[in-house]
Image (cartoon, rainbow, N blue to C red):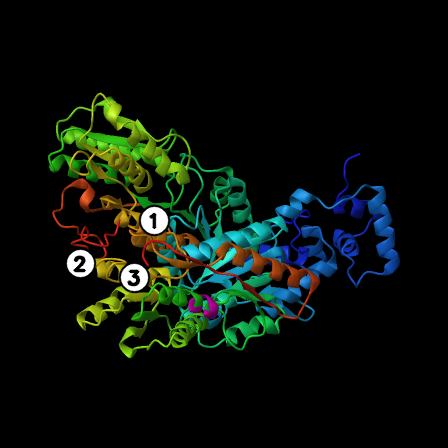
Amino acid sequence: MPIDLHDSTPLYLQIVNDIKSKIAGNKLKADDQLGSHAELASSYGVSVITVKKALATMIYEGIVFSRVGKGTYVAKPAPETHRREQRTIGLVLRDIRSPFFSRTMHAVEDAAYELGYHVLISNSSGKVEKEEAQIARFRKFGVTGMIIATMTHKYHATPTIRRLLHEGFPFVMVSYIADETIPLVGCDHALGGFMATDYLLKLGYQKVGYINGEEGNMVGELRLQGYQRALKAHGRRIDKRILFRLSKRGEWHDYQSGYEIGKRFGKLTVKPDAMFVYNDLSALGFEHALLEQGVRVPGDVAIVGFDDIERGEYAAVPLTTVRQPTDLIGRQAMELLVNQMKKKNGSIRRILKPELVIRESCGGARSATSFRSPRANVSRGGSIR
Amino acid sequence: MKHATIIDIAKKLRISPSTVSRALSNHPDIKLETKERIRRTAKAMLYSPNPIAKSLKISQTTTIGVIVPEIKHDFFSSAISGMEEVAYRSGYTIILCQSNENFERERINVETMIHHRVAGVIVSITQQTKRGTHFQDLLKRKIPLVFFDRVPGGVRASKVVINDYQSAFDAVSYLIGRGYKKIAHFGGPRELDICVQRWNGYIDAMKKQRLPVLKEFVRTGGLQEQNGYLSMDALIREHKIPDAVFAVNDPVAVGAFQRIGEAGLRIPGDIAIMGFSNNRITGLVDPPLTTVDQPSFLMGSTAAEILIETIEKRVTAPKTVILPAKLIVRGST
């Protein structure tokens, strides 16, 4: 029985949550009888007083009802207006500041609220241990499902996530995970890499390079695959001399890593005339380093990034990028989660198409057509760098 | 000898762990002799609360709920970081809701927090929040509540704010000191007290220097970039060009910035711009934006400290903390 004596959640609440999740998971149905006080006390390993308190709480909330002399029974689900009370989903986020996750979460929330769910958000702040604690905490809270944007760029699921799967707890990942048994709604990174590279090749660039993510970054590898496929499709060979890698330092150091590669540009034996970069942050660092050395963008080197972060629009040379379909990802993740919670069958993996956002850095557009607002005549006067 | 746990003590004394736990936390229901017997045993068995478990407390009763309009927004994400630092240090964890500037959602978020029995709630209200009745639900249940930055009227709770009025007054006074006279203000929604305060600061600073406040130059709108863009656009179309703009916040300033650039005008040469908040974007635009720095991290950490104090000592008298905000002069003015 899942009563954890080392957890400081009051015992009666642990019992309440356990029974609630059994009801949510259909292990207990309306009109099922819970055991007698003595039986419950014995099976949970607690005192009768604790059992009574748990039952009193659930009666108060309308989850169970008692018949004098007969016992306690699971109540029928409350009418729609009260349903909201019991339907909360948890969002476990790697980093609240990440534009990908925050956009995706907005879309999840919109869909969730439309469907009558409450939404709670937790923030990993970059620590795996905290993520595991958050997932555990959400479960004890009694959330009925979770949407998870996990920590690692690697391709396997953490033991905590494996356990969720094993226990049949409804959840959906929105950050890439290679394991196909794990429910995921994500962006087609390989296709994104293909689209970026293909576009540069179509514009006529001859030596299109790629700056990959750090060692072990699976998403970077997928984008590399797309890059390679595009080269092949245009009959080009892969030139390892224009393949680079960000140093292994993690998201908030990407800009610096891109910058370091840009600094080496002058010394390269083979200079690319276009560069597809793993993400916008590192692309911005790369661009900055090039411009500092008097290398022109896109004149000497065209650049395409990935992610469509806000800063890309304001870069010295506004950044062409690949945008992840965050609205769709969020909405479909919620749909998939609902299917899971209702135990419906169906595909548990949905990979969606990204789109190119064309700005000046690729040399493809004469006038700046930023995604949001026209920005012609940027260079006059108070230029927006 | 290994440290004993509550379970060990319970086994030894042949009573339930909940009784031991209650005795050790001095629960009124437990008889004094029982408490003493348990404490003696605990001492003899070298019981001490597990500090690791304490810091990983994954319990509803040590969770703090936070409701903010938007978690990605620089100001709020920084405030949340401040809260997390204090919370984690004191053995609490944080659960968030974002109200997305929507009153109805904020109302639901409050319900969610109550339903999940959080230990206390920290809130910054939405642009749409006109009344604070949903917050009364928290107060009725004696759930500790602290507001920061955007605070509703008529709710008796602690607040952590900056002096928006004084900061705006000082900022506009600075502009006047630099020689600007036709100063426009792009204000925020009148429902938000912080916007009203900044507005008043602007008006009073102008009056003090006997500068006219021209109706066309004072505009109300939302708090997003596009609101600044549209306000500036209206002025440009009407050929009413101010020599400086004081925007209610940085996003609005940046919106105005864009429109000015599009018109081929120079900043600050033709029009100076000043924002408020010191978001990251202020450093990304060229020239960088003059603004008022809000100590967001400190606001968050202070709010969390007050909340935890209230939760633990059951202090009921609400307090108001006003933090200092500094003018940061950059190239746009």
Tell me the kind of residue under disc 3.
Ala
Label 3 belongs to which residue? B272
Q: Residue at x 20, y 38 (%)?
A: A297
Q: Residues within 10 Å of mark 2 (few under 14, many from 20)?
A: some
**Is residue A38 highlighted in magenta?**
no
Label 1 belongs to which residue? A346
Left or right, B243 with reference to B141: left
Q: Quadrant of residue B12?
A: top right
Q: Chain of mark 1?
A: A
Instruction: From the image, give the main secondary structure of the stretch colored magenta.
Output: helix
Q: Chain of mark 3?
A: B
Instruction: Say which of marks 2 and 3 sits in front.
Output: 3
Q: Residues within 10 Å of mark 3 (few under 14, many from 20)?
A: many
Give the x, y percent position of residue B199: 40, 73
Q: Are marks 1 and 2 on the same chain?
A: no
Tell me the kind of residue under disc 2.
Gly
Instruction: Say which of marks 1 and 2 sits in front.
Output: 2
Which type of secondary structure does the marked residue at label 1 adopt? loop
Question: Which label sits on residue B165?
Answer: none
- Residue A333 seen in this snapshot: no
* Along the viewing direction, whichever of B207 and B48 lies nearer the viewer: B207
* Along the viewing direction, whichever of B239 and A102 lies nearer the viewer: B239
Asked whether the residues under the numbered discs 2 and 3 touch, taking CB atoms below 8 Å apart as contact, a structural biologist would say no
Please determine whether, in this image, residue A351 is positioned above or below residue B69: above
Which type of secondary structure does the marked residue at label 3 adopt? strand
Give the x, y percent position of residue A246: 35, 31
Which type of secondary structure does the marked residue at label 2 adopt? loop
- Residue B62 seen in this snapshot: yes
Magenta highlight range: B165-169
Label 2 belongs to which residue? B264
Q: Quadrant of residue B171?
A: bottom left
